[in-house]
Image (cartoon, coloured by chain):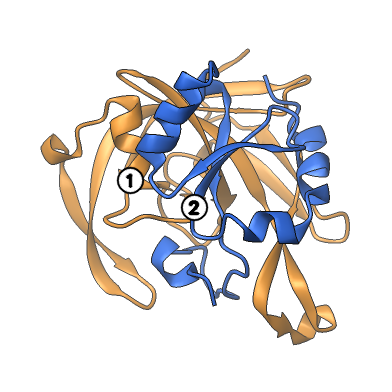
Amino acid sequence: MIIRYVPCPVRTAVPALGGAVLVPRPILAVRITGPSGPRLRDGLLDTGADETIIDPTVAPLIGVDLSQAPEREIYLIGRGRVRCRYAPVQLRISDGVAETYEWDTIVGFAPFPLLRGLLGFAGFLQSFNADFRGADQEVTLLPNALFSGRRI
Amino acid sequence: MIDINEFRRNQSRVPRAELEKYNGQYIAWSVDGSSILAADADPLRLDALLRTAGHDPSAILVSRVAIPEEVSWSGWHLAEDSTVS
């Protein structure tokens, strides 16, 4: 599956990008399904994230009760240690044309609203081989041997 | 189902000035990414707005508008850190 990077306007120019104020980011629409149904939200493919973390405002919309969810401490750059709650969900990604992948996993729900989810190793990148092609501003995702879901 | 690359192409053509009207809010995109169906500061209210308008919220991409975003050294972008400048 080939996903185009999304140009994001940023506050300060990036010197190594020639002073650009549009930063291309590997952002992917992800369908997150809980007990009461799915919602579609953007997530950032992030090889530096150990886990997959979802914006908590999605939880009530998909029927996930975070008050009953197990909690653990994680380290957040700029914030130090914060507590994150975890719940099982189903994730689905699709290019809408040829490839759709769906799998069950456990994700973290951040303790505060996020602009977009973080698609990190556990729960996401562990199951895909990702080829980030900077020059083309595209990423190719291919399910790997650890992918335990299904192609639709 | 959204053709995501076509969606992104259309989404990138939406003028920045148009998006800035919704800064700090959650917006619901049309299926082809060319327009904004509804917006609200509260994602639960936005969901209800979509239902009222006859849309299926489960098939609509919702994102939060933050223009500009911060340049970041990690993937974390907290909503509260991207308020209107």
From this view, report whether residue B67 is shown above or below residue A33: below
Q: Residue at x 44, y 36 (%)?
A: B46
Give the label, 1 or 2, closer to the camera: 2
Q: Residue at x 83, y 42 (%)?
A: B9
> SS class of the residue under badge 1?
helix
Residue B64 spot, x, y in % from top left: 52, 51
Towards the viewer: B39 or A128: B39
As measured in the structure, the alpha-carbon distance from the residue carrying label 1 to the one carrying label 2 is 15 Å
Question: Is residue A107 rendered to the left or right of residue A14?
Answer: left
> Which of the numbered marks, if any, corresponds to residue A56?
1
From this view, report whether residue A104 is shown above or below residue A53: above
Q: Residue furthest top?
A: A152
Residue A68 spot, x, y in % from top left: 12, 35
**Of the residues shown, which amino acid type is indicated by label 1?**
Pro
**Of the residues shown, which amino acid type is indicated by label 2?**
Gln
Task: Please count the marks in the image.
Answer: 2
Chain letter, blue: B
Q: Residue at x 62, y 66 (%)?
A: B67
Chain letter, orange: A
Question: Is residue A128 rendered to the left or right of residue A17?
Answer: left
Quadrant in the picture for the C terminus of chain B: bottom right
Is residue A100 among the parts visible in the rendering? yes
Towards the viewer: B3 or A98: B3
Asked if disc 1 and disc 2 are in contact, CB closer than 8 Å, the reply is: no
Q: Chain of mark 1?
A: A
Residue A36 spot, x, y in % from top left: 32, 18
> Which of the numbered marks, if any, corresponds to residue B25?
2
Q: Residue furthest left?
A: A68
Is residue A148 among the parts visible in the rendering? no
Quadrant in the picture for the N terminus of chain B: top right
Residue A135 spot, x, y in % from top left: 87, 61
Task: Give residue B33's quadrant in the image.
Answer: top right
